Image (spheres, rainbow, N blue to C red):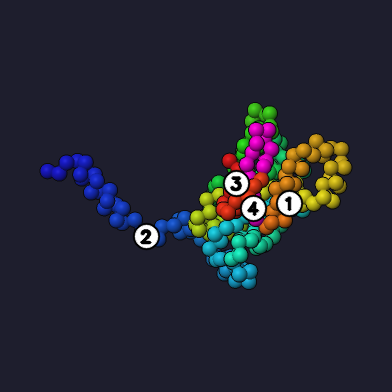
């Protein structure tokens, strides 16, 4: 009679032998009806866009950037030269709150700062959704509120409570791009959210408003990350210092970096 341990080991090996070799993150996502339908709706268009830009159809390095005032979300993708090129710009259909960071639960603010995608939700009540890592380390240090809030998503539909609502049409493209990037090995897809395009002219204009001056130190900090990408077309490595403010540096693996 075989020892029980041997029987269990044999069963485990047998089970591994029957694991399909094509089980990937993308294939698992496509087992969900909404995701598979999204692929049918947008994949050919996305592949044509890749060909036009001479970038990989695997989406192996992408980066999302959103601007609250302009109500725009961009997807950037790394080309064969190692620089990011603009893949597409999408209208943000709804966002709650005003200019300024999210600091507590229930303030209805869309966060501002440097994040990454940490959740893929094919069952969202808003069609499809991508969760970001709010509150990050900076948010935790810069807010004294006992409850910072959470559950911040980029999602479909046109209703927002601190999230970026992109419409069902646009979230399908954004979601499929993110799935492909994750499938290609991009563990953390950066998502940078700014109050506005942080040019010198815009900074002067918005900070001239008395009610917005309270954000000046934080916004000048965000501007450093904005200008880093604008000038280099590389995604910076983002870290947080002991005061809760962001620092930026370069790396050969730029595009994979994000905050905690």
Report, in whole angstroms, how far the alpha carbon at label 2 lies from the one at label 4: 33 Å
| Mark 1 nearby-residue class (10 Å; few <14, some 14–19, many ≥20) | some
Quarter the C terminus occupies: top right
Look at the numbered discs 1 and 4 and tell me whether their residues touch, using CB distance below 8 Å.
Answer: no
Quarter the N terminus occupies: top left
Residue underneath mark 2: 21
Question: Which span is picked out in magenta?
Answer: 234-247
Residue underneath mark 4: 235
Look at the numbered discs 3 and 4 and tell me whether their residues touch, using CB distance below 8 Å.
Answer: no
| Mark 3 nearby-residue class (10 Å; few <14, some 14–19, many ≥20) | many
Mark 2 or 4: in front is 4
* In-image side of 83 versus 215 (left or right): left
Residue underneath mark 3: 258
Q: Which quarter of the picture shows residue 98?
A: top right
Q: Position of residue 109 (x, y in %)?
A: 71, 40
Q: Earlier in the sequence, mark 2 or mark 4?
A: 2
Q: Earlier in the sequence, mark 3 or mark 2?
A: 2
Q: Position of residue 202 (x, y in %)?
A: 82, 50
- Give the residue displayed 65% in from the left and 33% down from the top: 242
Residue underneath mark 1: 227
Mark 1 or 2: in front is 1
| Mark 2 nearby-residue class (10 Å; few <14, some 14–19, many ≥20) | few
């Amino acid at each position: 009679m075989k020892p029980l341990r041997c029987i269990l080991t044999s069963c485990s090996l047998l089970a591994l032998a029957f694991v399909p070799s094509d089980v990937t993150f993308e294939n698992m996502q496509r087992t969900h009806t909404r995701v598979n339908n999204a692929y049918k709706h947008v994949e050919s268009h996305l592949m044509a866009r890749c060909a036009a830009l001479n970038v990989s159809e695997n989406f192996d390095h992408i980066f999302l950037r959103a601007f609250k005032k302009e109500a725009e979300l961009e997807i950037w993708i790394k080309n064969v030269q190692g620089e990011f090129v603009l893949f597409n710009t999408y209208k943000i259909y709804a966002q709650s709150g005003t200019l300024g960071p999210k600091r507590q639960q229930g303030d209805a603010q869309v966060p501002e700062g440097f994040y990454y995608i940490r959740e893929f939700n094919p069952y969202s009540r808003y069609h499809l959704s991508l969760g970001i890592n709010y509150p990050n380390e900076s948010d935790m240090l810069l807010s004294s509120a006992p409850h910072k809030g959470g559950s911040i998503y980029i999602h479909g539909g046109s209703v927002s409570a601190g999230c970026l609502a992109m419409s069902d049409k646009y979230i399908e493209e954004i979601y499929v791009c993110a799935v492909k990037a994750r499938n290609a090995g991009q563990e953390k897809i950066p998502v940078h959210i700014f109050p506005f395009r942080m040019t010198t002219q815009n900074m002067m204009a918005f900070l001239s408003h008395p009610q917005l001056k309270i954000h000046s130190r934080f916004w000048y900090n965000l501007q450093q990350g904005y200008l880093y990408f604008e000038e280099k077309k590389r995604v910076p490595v983002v870290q947080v210092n002991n005061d809760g403010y962001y620092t930026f540096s370069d790396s050969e693996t730029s595009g994979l970096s994000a905050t905690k």
